[in-house]
Image (cartoon, grey):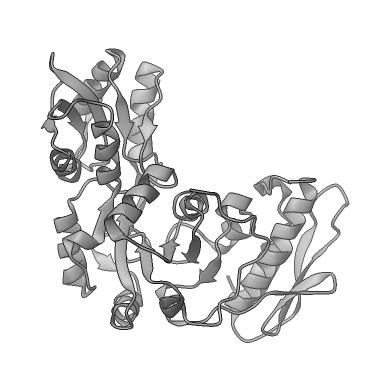
Amino acid sequence: MTDGPRRTAPQACERPLREAYDTALLDLDGVVYAGPEAVPHAVESLTAAHDAGMRLAYVTNNASRTPDAVAEHLTELGVPAAAEDVVTSAQAAARLVAERVPAGAEVLVVGGQGLVEAVRERGLRPVSELGEGTAAVVQGYSPDLGWRQLAEASYAVHRGLPWVASNTDLTVPTARGKAPGNGTLVNAVRAATGAEPVVAGKPLPPMHRETVIRTGAKRPLVVGDRLDTDIEGAFNGGVDSLLVLTGVTGPAELLAARPQHRPTYVAADLRGLAEPQPEVTADGDGFACRGWRASVADAGRGGAGVLRLDARGEDPLDGLRALCAAAWGAADAAGGVGGSGTEDAAPDARKALADLGL
């Protein structure tokens, strides 16, 4: 598995993405649904992609629900899905545990039913309390998790047992907004023990490995709404990615993205699967995309400068693509050779985004 390329602009694709790639590895929260409701345009876009021959695989860091439950929820929304199309961080975490303990071992599960069933799938015995024969502890998100379960995890880690976390996402999107995610719960055990877990979920390689094993994807496209999980996970796996702006990441965060957080493609929502992706080209001291032109003013005066729009087209998203090229290039230059592309080095984008209406 190799890292992806150092990206300096969103890339072009002459064919609709659903034709150029054989499998969409779709994040769920913020991409397909938000809480109980489908994200706008998700159902019709995924149905059309499926009908066009693209395999849909649903890849989630949320370890609380079983693949059957996730598939049932998707089907109720009208999205084509079966249990075998769902890959969870619980499954990746259970595989990591199975590689560290004897067959049939007792494993303390601190999480939801999805994690319990994933542990059973690997031939291990899930338990809810630490016992003399417990061989490992695995932790995943559950909205019902409380102090007692976190205390059991802490006791197990203090004993020196292997500790695997399904993911370390600090937040989880809900219909009411952001809520504490598994990373927040992991931090409680980390604070109590001083230990560090082995992490299975995105953006780390175990999740990508689990997904490829289960889907058999040859030309996968990762589709997500988070830079630090979905897009970085694609980068770590050396595969292309599509960022949709329906969840956690907004335009300002995208413009300030570090190199490993820069997506191959950008779309407003899942309708982007049905579209070719336009080319972003260098244009003098700026970058152009379908009538829009972006550049950086005042670069080199003690900072990375200010982003500006010098010409306008029809679709504001094309303007955002041009702004990405200008911002990423300026950030890399401000970071020096092999620059970090950190948020501190990103040009000021507030006025440009206001001009775009984003």
| Residue at 85% across, 74% down | 284
> Can the viewer see residue 176?
no
Name the quarter where the C terminus is drawn: bottom right
Up-down: is 355 above or below 225?
A: below
Q: Position of residue 304 (x, y in %)?
A: 79, 53
| Residue at 84% across, 69% down | 285
Up-down: is 54 above or below 179?
A: below
> Can the viewer see residue 40?
yes
Q: Position of residue 169 (x, y in %)?
A: 40, 43
Q: Position of residue 340 (x, y in %)?
A: 69, 45
In the displayed structure image, the side of residue 353 where residue 304 appears, left or right? right
In the displayed structure image, the side of residue 104 where residue 81 appears, left or right? right
Viewer-proximal residue among 128 and 86: 86
Up-down: is 76 above or below 120?
A: below
| Residue at 24% across, 27% down | 137
Q: How many numbered circles are shown? A: 0
Instruction: Tell which residue pokes out farthest to the right in this image.
Output: 301
In the displayed structure image, the side of residue 327 where residue 227 appears, left or right? left
Q: Position of residue 325 (x, y in %)?
A: 69, 66
Q: Quadrant of residue 85?
A: bottom left
